Image (cartoon, grey):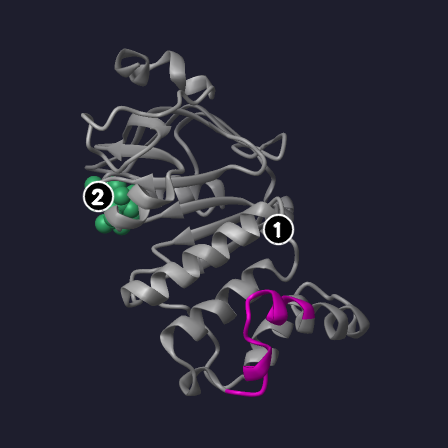
Amino acid sequence: MIVFENVTKAYRTNVGLDNVSVKIDKGDFVFLVGPSGAGKSTFIKLILKEIDADSGSIKVNGTEITDLPNRKIPKLRRSMGIVFQDFRLLPKMTVYENVAFAMEIIHMSSRAIRRQVPQVLSLVGISNKANKYPDELSAGEQQRVAIARAIVNNPTVLIADEPTGNLDPDTAWEIMRLLEQINLRGTTIVMVTHAKDIVDKMGKRVIVIEKGKVVRDDVGAYLTGEDAPKHKHTGMYMGGVFGSHV
Ligand SMILES: Nc1ncnc2c1ncn2[C@@H]1O[C@H](COP(=O)(O)OP(=O)(O)OP(=O)(O)O)[C@@H](O)[C@H]1O
């Protein structure tokens, strides 16, 4: 699904990623964590092909994307949905229109739009707000709309970049439950977060990046090395640095 092999990306004076190998399978739920400047955004930008790697191989859904021609980038990006900390809804469009717009720009038929938008609004629990504008919604409701927009075209991967960063703890948990529900339907989820409590309680796979390197990849709690991992992840990275922890 997403396979990094020996991927390096340097910026002029900074390390972005340094020889990273990681495998994320279809249906995985992965937290990507690490201190500020560690390389998390670099990882996400490489998957979306917003930036190019200096060396190494990146495969998404079986396709090598490091040498993907520009004309094929839109198709790659269509296979992924993305949600952000600050929702990024279009303020002059209603909830329904925000989600429908994601289908219109890829030229889906109005019949498909009429069918899928209500379905996805129902899935994220926001049907009753379909005709409201973003500024009439709570933060948690806005994030639900953003998630609806991200999944309406059935992406194989949902990238969530600090999706709970602007939410109070209870609302953050509601969003986590929603992401878990979407994951159970088969969508791979890659979530960048600094929320230690969420990572600890979810008990999902955690990839820790520090100074451009993957320093840990296992199922368990956030960062703390003494919290022994419950399971060993079988991804290719296990033969690497993390092998010494198990
Ligand atoms: N366009 C750029 N030009 C130069 N250096 C960059 C650029 N983008 C990122 N970097 C540097 O690369 C390193 C990794 O940055 P990245 O944005 O991937 O970190 P991050 O883990 O996402 O951080 P945060 O949690 O703060 O978002 C940092 O040292 C950063 O300063």
Residue beneath label 1, please?
155
- The reply to whether the residue tagged 2 has its Cβ within 8 angstroms of ligand 1 is yes
Residue 235 is a magenta residue: no
- Give the extent of the magenta segment: 119-132
- Rendering coords of residue 224 (x, y %): 19, 32
User: Mark 2 touching mark 1, by CB under 8 A?
Assistant: no
CA neighbours of label 1 inside 10 A, class few (<14), some (14 to 19), many (20+): some
Q: Is residue 232 visible?
A: yes
Left of 215 or right of it: where is 184? right
Left of 223 or right of it: where is 161? right
- Kind of residue indicated by mark 2: Gly
Residue 123 is a magenta residue: yes
Which is in the foreground here, disc 2 or disc 1? 1
Earlier sequence position, callout 2 versus callout 1 = 2
Q: Is residue 51 visible?
A: no
Q: Is residue 158 above or below residue 207?
A: below
Residue beneath label 2, please?
37
Residue at horizontal 43%, vertical 53%? 160
Instruction: Please tell me in which quadrant of the rendered image residue 232 appears.
Output: top left
**Quadrant of the drawing holding the C terminus:** top left
**Quadrant of the drawing holding the N terminus:** top right
Residue situated in front as seen by the camera: 236 or 200: 200
Residue situated in front as seen by the camera: 243 or 176: 176
- Kind of residue indicated by mark 1: Pro
